[in-house]
Image: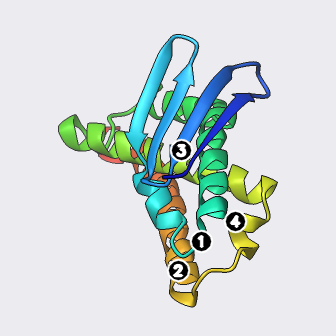
Amino acid sequence: MQQRDEHVRTWYGLEAEITVTEANLHRVALPSLSLPHPGVVNWFARQGLDVDTRLALTARHEFGHLQTLPVPLLHLLLLLWPRRGRPRLTGRLRFWLILLTHQTLWEAAAETYVVATDRRAVTAPRPRWARGLYALFWGCMTAFSILGTIRLLQRDQSAR
């Protein structure tokens, strides 16, 4: 089973070790934290690619999470920042929508990093159905993050 190991350093100085395997298991190890996880999102994104390209793009996507970390952190602060007026959504529904919106934004940001830094993300040979799945999946992730953010920022106008 093939695997790819990379030592990386973000633009803001964070160092990490990234390991991705052919079995789609990932590990991102920071100086004081190790995050092993299955590559659910990358499983969709890398369909139809040869193993070497799949591993390289998957490692780049994991690095993209670290490179774009300030974006989802600012997004989360925006969603949690207290504002005037009562939020339209409250309770558990609001919690889950914040979690999903934040995660889809972070995934879209990480994949945007991949596309911006490695042409193989869009030019590597893959079957037509896999290209369609890639476009559909990332389109849905981006749309959900935008629409979720808009919904979460809406305030109840009747409370005025």
Query: What secondary structure is marked by label 1?
Result: loop
Give the residue at mark 4: 121
- Between 42 and 80, the one lying in front of the other is 42
Mark 3 or mark 2, which is nearer to you? Answer: 3
Question: Alpha carbon of mark 4 to alpha carbon of mark 2: how far?
Answer: 12 Å
Q: What residue is at 59 percent from the left and 71 percent from the top?
A: 49
- Of pointers 4 and 2, the one earlier in the residue sequence: 4
Give the residue at mark 3: 20
Query: In the image, residue 61 lies at what x, y percent?
Result: 62, 48
Amino acid carrying label 2: it is Ala
Query: What secondary structure is marked by label 3?
Result: strand
- Residue 156: in sight, yes or no? no
- Between 136 and 26, the one lying in front of the other is 26
Do labels 2 and 1 touch, CB within 8 Å? yes
Question: Alpha carbon of mark 2 to alpha carbon of mark 1: how far?
Answer: 9 Å
Give the residue at mark 2: 130
Amino acid carrying label 4: it is Ala
Q: What residue is at 65 percent from the left and 42 percent from the top?
A: 64
- Position of residue 143 relative to residue 33, above or below, is below
- Of pointers 3 and 2, the one earlier in the residue sequence: 3
Question: Alpha carbon of mark 1 to alpha carbon of mark 3: how far?
Answer: 15 Å
Do labels 4 and 2 touch, CB within 8 Å? no
